[in-house]
Amino acid sequence: MILLRKKFIWFFAFFTFGLLAVMHAGTAQAASDEVRIQINDYLVTFPDAKPYIDGSNNLQVPLRLLIEQLGYQMEWSKNEQAIQVTLSSKQQKVVLQTGDRQVLVNGKTVTLESPPLLSQQTVYVPFRFVSETFGYQIQWDAVNKLAIIDADGLYHAPVWYAPKPKASILQSAYNYLGVPYVWGGSSPNGFDCSGYVGYIFQLSGVQLPRTSAEMYSSAGTRVMDIQEGDLVFFAEGRRTSHVGIYIGNDQFISATSYGGVTVASLNSGYWGSRYIGAKRL
């Protein structure tokens, strides 16, 4: 897990590997895709409207519940097709309008990177609004898809961790040891590397893109601390050419052209020199 801590922390560093998943039709769909919000040491519950990643890779958060949890009062009025919102506390008064990047903070104009928006009768603000407008420190935990607001100015560790992959994933992976390699194969009659990985995860209800290159670019989140069940990727030159499933102890299982479904070491001369990274679904 890598936690980033600065005055204005944002999380574009992981977009190339993780958030493109929400924009790709073949992306894995699972409960772990949900984004969670933490304020200090407690997890915010969103009973209705949920935080989500939009098409521009911005984390959008329902405004009312977030603001109430931070101790602000909220008033709103409809202005033609837009909603005008006033947020107030003892120290600040913030006036914003959906669709407008210009926000008044104690009478001074602040320009947001993306505007508040109205979606399904709910006003959403980009998560960065919290730091840009109120000056709170924020953290992004890409592994757990958890956004943390340090409202008290102190560092806070995650209070929620994404569950580790079910044992059924690894058990299913082992069940097909020795199945022969077939180029383009995606069934127990024969697998290629991505066909094998896709088949194993499909057994647990997770849909993956068809090729190893597509999995690397658009499925899951890039991780450094590899865990059992993570996808591991390899490349020939600049081209992603192979994918497998990490099984622990620096080993992974995959469908290879020389041995069918087999176990190999990440540290071997062949695979170690071609390893390019891991993704977690």
Image (tube, grey):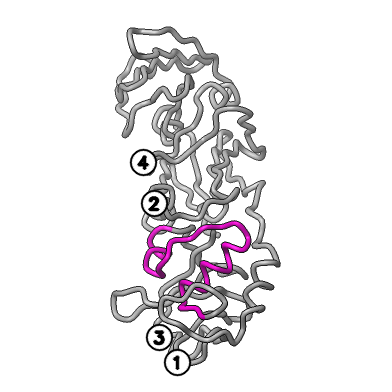
Q: Residues within 10 Å of mark 4 (few under 14, many from 20)?
A: few
Q: Residues within 10 Å of mark 2 (few under 14, many from 20)?
A: some
SS of the residue at dot 2?
loop
SS of the residue at dot 1?
helix
Q: CA distance from mark 2 to mark 4?
A: 10 Å
Residue 253, x across and y down, in percent: 57, 80
Q: Kindly indicate whether the residue at mark 1 contacts the one at mark 3 (C-beta within 8 angstroms).
A: yes
Q: Which residue is mark 3?
A: 273
Q: Earlier in the sequence, mark 2 or mark 3?
A: 2
SS of the residue at dot 3?
helix
* Magenta stretch bounds: 190-218
How many numbered marks does the figure carry?
4
Three-letter code for the amino acid on which mark 4 is drawn: Gly
Q: Which residue is mark 1?
A: 269
Residue at x 45% of width, y 86% of height: 271
Q: Kindly indicate whether the residue at mark 2 contacts the one at mark 1 (C-beta within 8 angstroms).
A: no
Residue 243, x across and y down, in percent: 46, 74
Q: CA distance from mark 3 to mark 1?
A: 6 Å
Point out the frontmost of discs 1 and 4. Answer: 4
Q: Earlier in the sequence, mark 2 or mark 4?
A: 2
Snapshot quadrant of residue 166: bottom right
Q: Earlier in the sequence, mark 1 or mark 4?
A: 4
Q: Decide: is 241 above or below 221.
A: below
Three-letter code for the amino acid on which mark 3 is drawn: Ser
Q: Earlier in the sequence, mark 4 or mark 3?
A: 4
Q: Earlier in the sequence, mark 1 or mark 2?
A: 2
Point out the frontmost of discs 4 and 3. Answer: 4
Q: CA distance from mark 1 to mark 4?
A: 40 Å
Residue 193, x across and y down, in percent: 47, 77
Q: Which residue is mark 2?
A: 24
